[in-house]
DNA sequence: GCGAACGTTCAGAAATTTCTGAAGACTGGA
DNA sequence: TCCAGTCTTCAGAAATTTCTGAACGTTCGC
């Protein structure tokens, strides 16, 4: 166990990287807090304290990560506060959910293919459509392969 | 061939969808213009006119889509202006390039795994790392499969 | 070399996003 | 029913992003 400082820095760094990857700042910081926490679950209050931000910001951030499918509400006996923790298959859920935006793009492209008769535009749009359709098609198998791999890895050794 | 209005609307709609998927507004509009244009290539001036925006905005947008690997400069004999057109394997390039941000995330997570000794945080970070590593691993094969499929399709019939 | 056509850069304006803090709503216990 | 603790909502402040337009480079034809 390397020191608490290293942990904090690593969490901060991951949050910044996620922001670089397109995530909103507060959501990323909250997610990092969940990932790096030693507790099994966190409350909104915990997060506000850990991140040094207002209750309002935390509320928004939690709503966002819940909606992404990364964390879930759990009910802890004897506590009136709402607890949240990382979901078990958070990452595959996120991946699958991302593909609804791919689906939106695909739909928009198909509309374009219909609107354009023939010529260069048609060819370009068909190319784009084909790729997005392919991605959407392959995603489920990819996720399934990962789930399987993980299951095996959990039964057997922890190393590949 | 449905009317010019339908084409414009479809282009606009695709641009908006791409914005929804995280792309910047002007970049998305420019990309849509490239996709839907009847010409083989466009100049910065063409784009400025088509989109009704300043030369400065166009310059920035072009820089961005070039850097994404979606369009390329071509040199047209007899024209002093710089022409751009969609690259042939634009979408697979984009996909591959996206994975450098996945790689950044993976690196940040690995740093987290190192910083955290054991316990819940360790398990969560390992889960995340495994998924991102898996994605990165599978990407090249996915792209190759698509390229192959496309090659076949081009030789044979245009329909699946 | 000169001049004109193009493209790029950058400071600042405009629009948008993000955060806060205060007010209000919900929940469970007494 | 009332109260205290907890969470959510929302208007506005603050920060950030995005776009413009003007000034500056570049390049090509002459």
Image (tube, coloured by chain):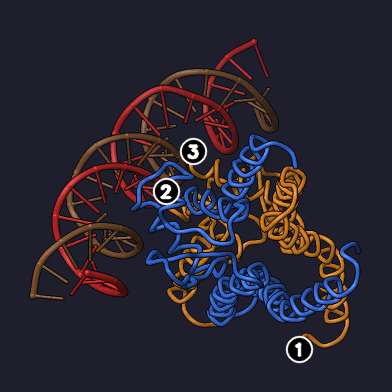
Chain colours: A blue, B orange, C red, D brown
Alpha carbon distance from label 2 to label 1: 55 Å
Residue tagged 3: B56
Q: Which residue shows up at 67% across the image and 58% down it?
A: B120
Horizontal arrangement in the rendering, residue A21 relative to residue B152 (left or right): left
Q: Nearer the viewer, residue B4 or A30?
A: A30
Q: Secondary structure at mark 2?
A: helix
How many other residues sit within 10 Å of disc 1, few (<14), some (14-19) or many (≥20)? few
Instruction: Indicate the position of residue C15 as horizontal and vertical percent values.
Output: 32, 49
Q: Which residue shows up at 81% across the image and 78% down it?
A: A148
Instruction: Indicate the position of residue B153 as horizontal and vertical percent values.
Output: 83, 81
Residue tagged 2: A48
Instruction: Indicate the position of residue A78 as horizontal and vertical percent values.
Output: 42, 69
Horizontal arrangement in the rendering, residue A151 relative to residue B122 (left or right): right
Q: Disc 1 sits on a residue from what chain?
A: B
Looking at the rendered structure, whether the residues under marks 2 and 1 are on a common chain is answered as: no
Residue tagged 1: B159
């Amino acid at each position: 166990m390397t020191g608490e400082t290293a942990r904090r820095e690593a969490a901060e760094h991951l949050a910044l990287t996620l922001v670089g990857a397109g995530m909103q700042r507060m959501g990323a910081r909250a997610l990092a807090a969940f990932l790096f926490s030693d507790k099994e679950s966190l409350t909104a209050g915990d997060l506000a304290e850990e991140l040094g931000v207002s209750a309002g910001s935390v509320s928004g951030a939690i709503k966002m990560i819940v909606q992404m499918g990364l964390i879930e509400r759990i009910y802890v006996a004897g506590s009136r506060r709402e607890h949240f923790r990382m979901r078990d298959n958070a990452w595959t859920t996120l991946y699958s959910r991302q593909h609804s935006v791919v689906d939106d793009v695909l739909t928009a492209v198909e509309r374009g293919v219909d609107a354009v008769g023939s010529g260069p535009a048609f060819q370009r749009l068909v190319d784009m459509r084909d790729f997005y359709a392919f991605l959407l098609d392959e995603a489920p198998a990819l996720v399934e392969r990962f789930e399987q791999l993980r299951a095996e890895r959990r039964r057997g050794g922890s190393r590949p």
